[in-house]
Image (spheres, helix red, strand yellow):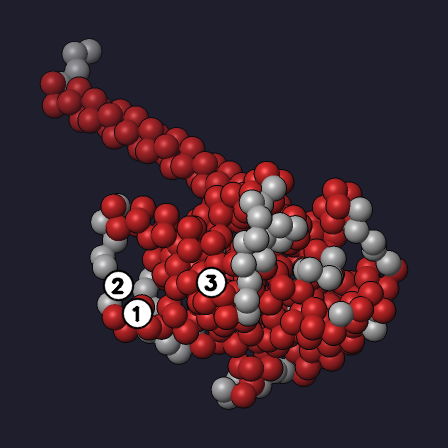
Amino acid sequence: MKKEPGNLTLAGNANSTLEVSSRLQEASTVQAKQERLLIGLSLLTLFVIWGSTYLGMRIAIETFPPFLMAGIRFVAAGAILYLILRVRGAPAPTLKQWGGAAIIGFFLLVGSNGLVSYAQQWVASGISAIALAAVPLYTALMMGVLGRWPTRLEWVGLAIGFCGVVLLNLQKGIWVNPQGAIALLLAPLSWSLGSVLSTRITLASGLMASAMQMLLGGLEQLVVGVSLGERLTSWPTWRSLTALIYLILFGSLVAYCAYGYLLRKVRPALATSYAYVNPVVALILGVGLANESFTLMSAGAMVVILLGVALVSLRKKRET
């Protein structure tokens, strides 16, 4: 039986449509797999790199003054990222956005990162990481002052978490130098305040905001360092220089790009899950590579703080 030409055309079109649909589905599957791989690599990057920055800072300040080291790190990283974004077509920030970046950069970098660098002259890198793990606890309280008070479960988490903070500060080694201990107590408070203010201040979007905060916050750190009398009295060792370069390239540039990618691709609760892993990574690296002491009280404090943070974050995860 002879087929009509019209039927042949319809059959050919149907086959072509099915073939195109199949190819599109295959391409979509490949793209989804690549995206899952990038998400996994980005999470691993944050876990390892941001967990290792505490040891990196400890090594860098062996021959660099703490605030000058932090200032050099963030001015360099911020300038590089800003130039890359502008070359790629990002619009120039407004004066108001620069002002907002200066405020947030002060709280995040001078008041938090700078104080951690300062404290690490006397306190182990792993202990510093545990102290910073309390940031979500302070943030929850500050959000309450602005009208969003914690739920019952969050109050339980706050109580447990702050018991961990007290347990951490009961260790004799932390209070060998009161200045370092006080700096370590103030650092998470400053980061939390900066994080809360960032939701109410005009900032640039995405990575541009990070670049501006690093650039201006780094300049502010340099001013603080010079005001405190910090000076480079001798040429830093290659060990400290290598640590500083690592902090600039990986601790700031690579990690911030990975974090920005995660914020665009996954829910916030997953993007910020590094907060649970970084203290563990910092402790392992500090003990394994720098022979830092690690007591049962430190381990207990870490577990208690992270349990409190998990309870405080539980509602946020449900909401996202």
Indicate the amino acid at tag 1.
Answer: Gln
| Quarter of image, res 102 | bottom left
User: Whole-Å distance between the Cαs marked 2 and 1?
Assistant: 6 Å
Left or right for 216, reference 269: left
Callout 3: helix, strand or loop? Answer: helix
Q: Residue furthest left?
A: 5
Q: Of label 2 and label 3, which has the lower sequence position?
A: 2
Q: Which labelled disc corresponds to residue 222?
A: 3
Residue, disc 1 = 97
Left or right of 306 on screen, residue 6: left
Of residues 133 and 290, which is closer to you in this image?
Answer: 290
Instruction: Check disc 3 and give the amino acid type.
Output: Leu
Q: Mark 1 or mark 3: name the one nearer the start of the chain.
A: 1
- Cβ atoms at labels 2 and 3 below 8 Å apart: no
Report crowding for label 2: few under 14, some 14 to 19, many 20 or more residues within 10 A (C-alpha).
some
Q: Residue at x 49, y 52 (%)?
A: 73
Image spot of residue 183 (x, y percent) = 65, 71
Q: Foreground mark, 2 or 3?
A: 3
- Residue 76 vs residue 19, the one in the foreground: 76
Asked whether the beta carbons under mark 1 and mark 3 sit within 8 Å of each other, the answer is no
Q: Is residue 155 above or below residue 243?
A: below
Residues tagged 2 and 1 counted as in contact (Cβ below 8 A): yes
Query: Can you see residue 241?
Result: yes
